[in-house]
Amino acid sequence: MHRLVNLRHLNFIGTSVNKKPMHLGKLRNLQTLTSFYVSKCSGSSIKELGQLDSLRGQLSIFQLQNVVFPIDAVMANLKNKKYLETIELGWSEKNESSISERDVLEKLKPHTNLKRLTIRNYGGTRLPDWFSDGSLFTIVSLELSGCKYCFSLPQLGQLPFLKELSFSGLDGVVAIGPEFYGNNSSSIVRPFGSLEILEFRDMLEWEDWCCFEDHIQGAAFACLQELHIQNCPKLTGKVPQHLPCLTKLVIDRCHQLESSIPRAPVMENLELKECKTVLLKHLPSTLATVEIRGSGIPDSLLWKILINNLSVKRLSIVNCPDVELPMCNCYTSLKQLYVKDSCDSLRSFSLNFFPKLQKLFLYSCKYLETLSNSEEGQEFMTSLSWLRIRGCSKFVSFGNGGISAPKLEWCHIQDMENMKSLPEQMHTLLPSLGQLILIDCPLVNSFPEGGLPPRIKHLSISRCSKLVASRMDWGLCRLHSLQSFYISCGYDNVESFPDEGLLPTSLSTLSFYKCWNLKSINHKGMLCLASLKETKYY
């Protein structure tokens, strides 16, 4: 390939190619080279990049542990590649700390036009001098990942165009001090003045964060929009408290963090996962999405989220069995509710208190018995379009009279071992239902009186023994909109299917899954299926 001297573009994105042609350095007109794997062989050493000064766009250099002599990194001549905007430098994940690695990285100094830089699995204890000498002046995005021997973060606060900053797997970092904000933080007016996204992930030894606002209130992170702190189990100090532009905050698996959440007057998204000591003192009225996962947040604070923040549209509660979801107030803004392995006090779920709810997901609510809306509230349940209930072992019914949800289109009911019946009057109260999925509901023995809604298009029945046994009473032949039917009957006594007159003529897809006792397809039941296009067996 080295003879193709006029070649302009060599793109390996989306491939697993990690061995490059020998003597790439002879392709001096090359403009695109997405990745380069360093080899100890002379024909594939990093020196091959030296003459490729026309490279532009992005370049990833991998297996830098194979650079034997730091002088070879100088010969790669990155500092003269003024058209490159994105560079990724990567060592092997199994790379061991090496004194020479800092020397190698020091000599891979990029051109000052660089916009995005990623460094992975670097084995040095500190970063090179060009991180703070102005070489990264135009940098917009910086990521350091897996640099487990680095014991301090670089001085980045003065970079005027930096918008995205991510750190992960820096096991050597114990504290983030004032130097993070600049050479002389006390004289800097607004460190990280352009930063919009800041991420700390898997910082396993990180204990303390010296927030710059301790010195000048609100001076740092004036434009920060997203803050992610994930899997930092030893972090005990506080996080920045004044973030006027913050819209999203994620705190995940920070078990010892005892900080209050920041004062963020425009925050819209809040995620708290397994961080029970985080305090909710400053909850803005702009919150739209709240996710609580195994955090041990007191009931009073959840109540504060729901009641005092009328703008909350999406709420997720996961692995919080002691949290209560009070059924005595109208949640007027909530559009999506997800509850899993939580709210053990919940016995009955009333849709009346959720007039704008569009999607409802109830998973493993182990004491939930009923879901309903009273006649007085049925006229308000005009928004619900998705309903999924799964693994609620004590759930029995949908209340007397059924549930009125005229816009409900999708209903999935699964692992309901004690549920005895489907909602009453489905054919009239759920007129828009287009898809119904029933899985592992062993006590349901029939569809409700009047049958299924007339607009239903997709019906799936899996491991519902009593319901399958009464299949001749289903009345599916009246459902002229039904297009697909899926059945999984396991070891039920179903030897022939479908029975004559069971399925409507509109059916186009018929699927069988794990029907172990099925011996034959009933040709009489198939003759009327004039629209059938596909039959599937699993």
Image (cartoon, grey):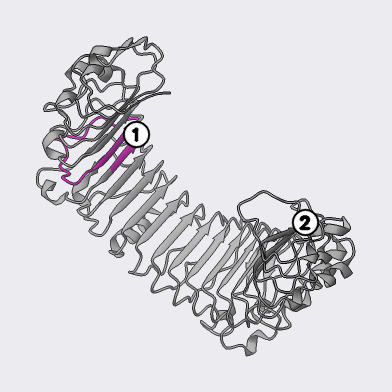
Q: Residue tagged by mark 1?
A: 392
In the rendered structure, the answer to whether residue 286 lies left or right of residue 26 reads left
In the image, residue 247 lies at what x, y percent? Answer: 43, 69
In the image, residue 413 lies at what x, y percent? Answer: 31, 33
Decide which of 327, 27 is in the foreground and name it. 27
In the rendered structure, the answer to whether residue 166 lies left or right of residue 514 reads right
Residue 12, placed above or below residue 248: above
In the image, residue 358 lies at what x, y percent? Answer: 26, 51
**Numbered disc 2: secondary structure:** loop
Reply yes or no: does residue 403 show up in magenta. Answer: yes
| Residue 119 quadrant | bottom right
Confirm whether residue 104 shows in the render. Answer: yes
Q: Which residues are magenta?
A: 387-413
Point 36% across, 29% down: residue: 415
Point 12% across, 46% down: residue: 378
Report the mark closest to the observer, 2 or 1.
2
Tell me the kind of residue under disc 2: Gln
Point 34% across, 56% down: residue: 314
Toward the bottom, the furthest residue is 187
**Numbered disc 1: secondary structure:** loop
In the image, residue 175 lies at what x, y percent? Answer: 68, 68
Q: Which mark is residue 63?
A: 2
- The span from disc 2 to disc 1 (Cα, nearest Å) is 51 Å
